[in-house]
Amino acid sequence: MPKKSQTASASGTRAALKSPGKTELRPPARDFQAQVFAQYPLEVASASGVWLMNTRGERVLDLYGGHAVAGLGYAHPAWSAALAEQAQTCQFQSNAVAMQVRAKAARRLVRFSKLPFGSVFFVNSGAEANENALKVALRMTGRAHVAAVEGGFHGRTAAAGAVTWGAQAKWYGFPRTPFDVSFIPRGASGAIAEHVTTDTAAVIVEPVQGLAGAVPLGSAFLATLRARCDEVGALLIFDEVQCGMGRTGEPFAANLYSVRPDMLTAAKALGNGFPVAALLMSPMVSASLRTESLGTTFGGGPMACAAVNAVLAAIREQRLLERVRRLSAYIRRSCLVGPVSAVQGEGLLLGLRTTRAAKEIQAELLECGILTGTSSDAHVVRLLPPYILEEQHVDLLRDALKDLDP
Ligand SMILES: Cc1ncc(COP(=O)(O)O)c(C=O)c1O
């Protein structure tokens, strides 16, 4: 018998709505945008390379890359041209209609990964890619439990939010999670067996945790996860939405740590700002799919795939993986100054550990014309710059940090 709350009439439901206290009410936004994001004190008018231009005509060095999205930087000529050309050629057909631009994007992405994936399913966002990965794992195994890792972030939808550390307490919003979830303490290889059992459908993990403050989980922990998944018949999902697509200096963190997941999700830098995400699946997982197992209208649209092709071509032609590795080493060497006590992370997903509150440092850097990010660690300033970064840009950061109070 359904619970009373599920059968309430419309008027009853309305009456049951929690009335917000006076202090919770916010005045309506003048421009009608939902007021759900904390705002940077910055309005961007245009951008080029690694530079943003604000509405006062001042340049700001972007070391945050639009939340890790702008891997090629802004106004990248080949990326812009590819989108313009695809818009003229055919802007949209769904997955039900074959298009060479989509086939090319899937083929190139698998080749780029250097991993033996069997198929790619393109969707629109990181959360949607994770949602689909979890669905595939639950269906394949017929199990109802998923293990995730403390500190991980996987998105804001029902399944992705369910495996996000801390979401239930902060913003989850759904009355219950769609499956059972447990969280493995970060880095605790010894605790894996207790959380990953024959009831577990999948383990989902960010190999380098992004929002947590650029925290690498390392090969030993990830290899133990792999071994335990094999032992109990669970699937291993790498969420590389933030740390993938070259950001670690390798195609994916799976390459960096030499651990092969059954599924891998990518987004953010995959489209350089055109919304696109991908779920890459091993041949075994691919073989479990049937017509209508998964679906989407916009996912895999030709504009998105043209963006993916342009990103993959630019990474190869501009030798951006080498550049990510070089600039990462340069930041680690030069930026241990002022309030920075340590540098953590991989490639160009870096966290500057700060002696003072990260929010304070971030605000002071922005006053010097440098945009950085924070993280869920109150003492980590996060750097997610475009891969086209140069040493001279890092020098600007180093000099600004030197001038700040330690
Ligand atoms: C590791 C990770 N997974 C998933 C997501 C969710 O991606 P999206 O915002 O595109 O849904 C994010 C977004 O920040 C992320 O960093």
Image (cartoon, rainbow, N blue to C red):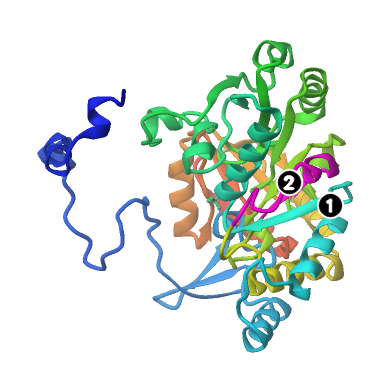
Residue at left offset 27%, top offset 32%: 6
Q: Which residues are magenta?
A: 278-295
Q: Say how many tags the image has.
A: 2
**Considering only vertical position in the picture, is 302 above or below 163?**
below
Does 359 sit left or right of 260 as displayed? left
Residue 68 falls inside the magenta stretch: no
The amino acid type of the residue labelled 1 equals Ser
Indicate the secondary structure of the residue bearing disc 2: loop
Q: Compute the Cα span from label 1 to label 2.
A: 21 Å
Residue at left offset 76%, top offset 45%: 333
In this orientation, which residue lies closer to the viewer: 239 or 99?
99
Does 156 sit left or right of 184 as displayed? left
Q: Could you tell me if residue 377 is visible in this image?
A: yes
Task: Single out the residue that lies furthest toward the front.
Answer: 1
Q: Which mark is residue 245?
A: none
**Are there few (<14), some (14-19), or many (20+) residues within 10 Å of tag 1?**
some
**Quarter-of-image position of residue 71:** bottom right
Residue 141 location in percent, x, y? 70, 28
> Cβ(mark 1) to ligand 1 < 8 Å?
no
**Where is mark 1, residue-wise?**
113
In this orientation, which residue lies closer to the viewer: 346 or 359?
346
**Considering only vertical position in the picture, is 384 above or below 311?**
above
In this orientation, which residue lies closer to the viewer: 204 or 63?
204
Residue 287 falls inside the magenta stretch: yes
**Considering only vertical position in the picture, is 359 above or below 51?**
above
Quarter of the picture containing the N terminus is: top left
**Quarter-of-image position of residue 394:** bottom right
**Quarter-of-image position of residue 307:** bottom right
Residue 211 location in percent, x, y? 56, 40
The amino acid type of the residue labelled 2 equals Leu
Residue 303 location in percent, x, y? 64, 74
